[in-house]
């Protein structure tokens, strides 16, 4: 299959690209920085020499750049079977009234406007080619959960759930399929503050994260296997951290403590 992944030069996105390539599929990686794209392409081509890896700079908040990403994918791979809307950012983790306006606007532009742009480009293009599936990435807040200091991020992810539900209804008789993708709590730059901002609150958060969080290397194989298994099933959901798994983690914590940060030196 031919797979486009937005925001895929690091973290979950890069992990997804590796797992698709490992299973024999071709990928397009993208992010806003040309140096990051070049580095990811070089690494992936070196690791998977038998596969096609296309790189394209793309700021998903810019509709024209998203269209150019689709065009680059078709030029490089011939078609797009799977489009993964992974690009995302978090605002500064402080009470909302303290967040600079340009900061939360960037979060909204990437997480929501960017996702809308990607769906707006991919849906008619997949109609034209006769098939294709789009996976929209959920996050904290998608299910209505609320936590202080992440209001802009949570609001965008709540909107992602609504928008995806609407697309499932709109496209139910079409050749274009839509699904939900949820990685749970993954240790990436979005989750871990820089050393200078790791205070007592961070140490308290680590206790919960050691129960619930996972590494990119743990989560991305599950997500890719799920996307491949559910390919073509309209309204499918591939979710790593289910309520049952959360309950099991807390029960297990009574007898065995996890340390997901130790091997990473955090």
Image: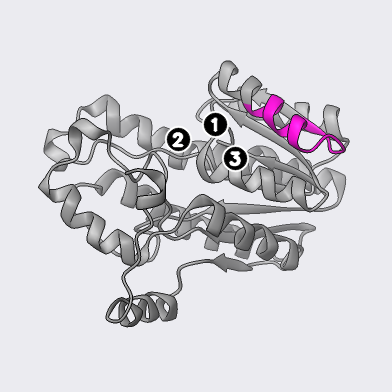
Indicate whether 122 appears above or below 135: above
| Lower position in the chain sequence, tag 2 or tag 1 | 1
Graded by Cα atoms within 10 Å as few (under 14), some (14 to 19) or many (20 or more), the crowding at tag 2 reads many
Circles 2, 1 touching at the beta carbon (< 8 Å): yes
According to the picture, the residue beneath numbered tag 1 turns out to be: 60
- Residue 215 in the image, given as x and y percentages of width and height: 47, 53
According to the picture, the residue beneath numbered tag 3 turns out to be: 14
Q: Secondary structure at mark 2?
A: helix
How many numbered dots are placed on residues in this image?
3
Q: Secondary structure at mark 1?
A: loop
Asked where in the image residue 252 lies, by quadrant, the reply is bottom left
Residue 144 in sight: no
According to the picture, the residue beneath numbered tag 2 turns out to be: 110
Q: Residue at x 51, y 36 (%)?
A: 114
Q: Residue at x 19, y 31 (%)?
A: 196
Indicate whether 254 appears above or below 5: below
- Residue 109 in the image, given as x and y percentages of width and height: 42, 33
Tell me the CA gap for discs 3 and 1.
16 Å
Q: Is residue 203 magenta?
A: no
- Between 107 and 248, the one nearer to me in the picture: 248
Compared across the picture, whether 46 is left or right of 224 comes to right
- Residue 83 in the image, given as x and y percentages of width and height: 68, 46
- Residue 99 in the image, given as x and y percentages of width and height: 18, 33
Graded by Cα atoms within 10 Å as few (under 14), some (14 to 19) or many (20 or more), the crowding at tag 3 reads many
Compared across the picture, whether 26 is left or right of 193 comes to right
Compared across the picture, whether 73 is left or right of 190 comes to right
- The residue mark sitting in front, 3 or 2, is 3
Asked where in the image residue 8 lies, by quadrant, the reply is top right
Boundaries of the magenta span: 40-53
Q: Is residue 49 magenta?
A: yes
- Between 89 and 186, the one nearer to me in the picture: 186
């Amino acid at each position: 299959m031919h797979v486009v992944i937005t925001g895929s030069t690091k973290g979950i996105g890069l992990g997804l690209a590796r797992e698709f390539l490992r299973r024999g599929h071709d990928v397009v990686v993208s992010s806003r920085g040309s140096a990051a794209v070049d580095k990811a392409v070089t690494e992936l081509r070196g690791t998977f020499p038998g596969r096609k890896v296309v790189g394209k700079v793309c700021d998903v908040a810019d509709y024209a750049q998203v269209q150019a990403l689709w065009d680059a994918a078709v030029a490089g791979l011939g078609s797009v079977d799977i489009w993964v809307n992974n690009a995302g950012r978090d605002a500064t983790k402080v009470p909302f009234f303290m967040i600079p306006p340009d900061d939360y606007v960037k979060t909204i532009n990437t997480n929501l406007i960017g996702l809308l742009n990607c769906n707006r480009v991919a849906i008619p293009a997949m109609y034209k080619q006769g098939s294709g599936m789009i996976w929209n990435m959920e996050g904290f807040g998608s299910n209505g959960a609320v936590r202080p200091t992440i209001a802009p991020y949570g609001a965008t992810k709540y909107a992602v759930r609504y928008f995806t539900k609407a697309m499932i209804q709109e496209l139910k008789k079409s050749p274009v399929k839509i699904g939900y993708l949820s990685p749970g709590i993954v240790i990436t730059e979005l989750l871990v503050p820089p050393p200078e901002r790791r205070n007592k609150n961070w140490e308290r958060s680590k206790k919960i994260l050691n129960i619930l969080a996972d590494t990119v290397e743990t989560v991305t194989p599950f997500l890719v296997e799920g996307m491949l298994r559910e390919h073509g099933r309209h309204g499918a959901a591939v979710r790593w951290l289910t309520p049952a798994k959360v309950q099991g983690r807390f029960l297990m914590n009574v007898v065995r403590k996890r340390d997901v940060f130790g091997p990473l030196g955090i």
